[in-house]
Image (spheres, rainbow, N blue to C red):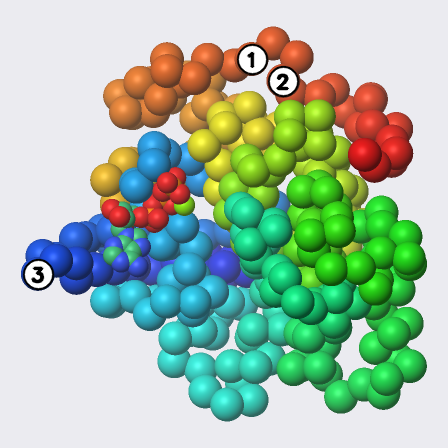
Amino acid sequence: MTASALLSVRHIVKDYRAHGQTVRAVDDVSFDIAPGTTFGLVGESGSGKSTVARCALRLVDPTSGEALIDGVDIHRARGRALRELRARVGMVFQNPVAALNPRIPVRDSIAEPLRTHERLSRSQIDARVAALLDEVGLATTHAARLPHQLSGGQCQRVGIARALATRPELLVLDEPTSALDVSVQAQVLNLLRRLRAEHGLTFMLISHDLDVVRYMSDVAGVMCRGALVEVGPAAQVLTSPAHEYTAQLLAAMPPTPGAVHPPASLDTNEMSPLP
Ligand SMILES: Nc1ncnc2c1ncn2[C@@H]1O[C@H](COP(=O)(O)OP(=O)(O)OP(=O)(O)O)[C@@H](O)[C@H]1O
Ligand SMILES: [Mg+2]
């Protein structure tokens, strides 16, 4: 492990038992993510990307291996140490509407991690929720709404605000834009880039969209049938890959001209009015 890694995934193996058979979803995967960098993970459906992410944040237990956050194994931490580690990481899911409780107003979805992790008064929580809504480009009037009263893009902004509530250092983003309309995807990516810059965040970004990974990532990893087959600088891995499987992925998904939004247009784009 690199001493400075914020997230260090070490030899993670995850077996699932289904219909009497064992499926090795993740097969000895290791990588490090340095603070302030973005690690993009690509690979075809079923290659184990989400399972690695879930093991890294202890949403599922690996069969073996470790996931160190700032040097501490999240799978061995207990009690207060575990709560502290959990507050340092956040996760954003693919389907923003399904990720939110349909009966809980936006305000309470965002406040929930605060109530779990911090002892704050009601007015302190209200102030934090208002600040988080503002950070993700939502109005205070959205606080009282239910998820079905928001667009998909607005729901994902709520998901991001919720993930940021405890002021984490690491965000794991599992296909954060794939369920969104194309026009909204760029807005959400640009929001993530702005938040990353403002807070010095570290990202682990999973996407099947190679343009998204190119646009967002410093380092890219490629998974194939549970194994990490290639890791390196994103620009290199996603243009002149060393591994044949990556070359096949690239051939199947060549760069889309115009799909990657030039930095110059970012900030205006992101703040354009919501639908
Ligand atoms: N809870 C589970 N029970 C049994 N098998 C599972 C479970 N979750 C995942 N798997 C299996 O593990 C493998 C990896 O799944 P995973 O969801 O990690 O892939 P993925 O790369 O995220 O795919 P996608 O791009 O479709 O999201 C697949 O074969 C999947 O069927
Ligand atoms: Mg997945």
Question: Residue lying farthest top?
Answer: 257
Instruction: Please tell me which residue lies in front, 132 or 234.
Output: 132
- Residue 259's disc is 2
Instruction: Name the quarter where the N terminus is drawn.
Output: bottom left
In this view of the protein, which residue sits in the foreground, 130 or 102?
A: 102
Provide the residue designation for mark 1: 256
Which residue occupies the foreground of this view, 242 or 27? 27
Q: Nearer the viewer, mark 2 or mark 3?
A: 3
Circle 3 Cα neighbour tier, 10 Å, few/some/many (<14 / 14–19 / ≥20):
few
Cα distance in 3D space between marks 1 and 3: 42 Å
Report the Cα–Cα distance between label 2 and label 3.
43 Å
Residues at marks 1 and 2 touching, judged by CB atoms closer than 8 Å: yes
- How packed mark 1 is, by other alpha carbons closer than 10 Å (few <14, some 14-19, many 20 or more), is few
- Give the labeled residue for mark 3: 20
> How far is the residue under mark 1 from the one under mark 2?
5 Å
Relative placement, left or right, of 235 versus 135 is left
Q: Residue at x 43, y 67 (%)?
A: 59
Give amino acid for label 1.
Answer: Thr
